[in-house]
Image (cartoon, grey):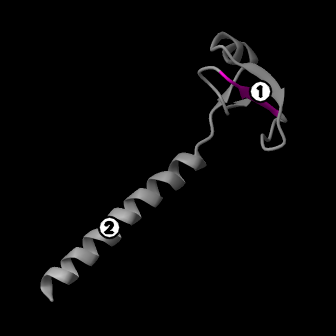
Amino acid sequence: MRRLTLSLATAVLGLGALFGAAGTAAAHQQLITPDRCEAGGGQVIESGTSPTGLGCEGGTYNGAWVLG
């Protein structure tokens, strides 16, 4: 019984760490300049998910929000 409890506790902690890390990564969106997007090999595009209305597509900063 003790092994089962320990196994379940380990599994719960592992899942908590996995989902906690994913949530933290999603909460920190990078904000860059248009020049930085293009220097990294990307293109500035219109974005409905960015608060600035612009995003970087492709290159090093793919998915980053771009200052407008």
The residue to which callout 2 is attached is 13
Identify the residue at image location x=31%, y=69%. Answer: 11
Identify the residue at image location x=53%, y=55%. Answer: 23
Residue 56 placement, left or right of 7: right
Residue 5 placement, left or right of 57: left
The residue to which callout 1 is attached is 67
> Amino acid type of disc 2?
Leu
Quarter of image, res 47: top right
Image quarter hosting the N terminus: bottom left
The relative height of residue 43 versus residue 65 in the rendered view (above or below) is: above
Q: Nearer the viewer, residue 19 or 32?
A: 19
Q: Nearer the viewer, residue 41 or 29?
A: 41
- Does label 2 or label 1 sit earlier along the sequence? 2
* Residues drawn in magenta: 54-58
Q: Is residue 57 magenta?
A: yes
- Residue 27 position within the rendered picture, expressed as x and y whole percent measured from the top left: 59, 49
Q: Is residue 1 magenta?
A: no
- Residue 32 position within the rendered picture, expressed as x and y whole percent measured from the top left: 67, 25
Quarter of image, res 10: bottom left
- Residue 2 position within the rendered picture, expressed as x and y whole percent measured from the top left: 13, 85
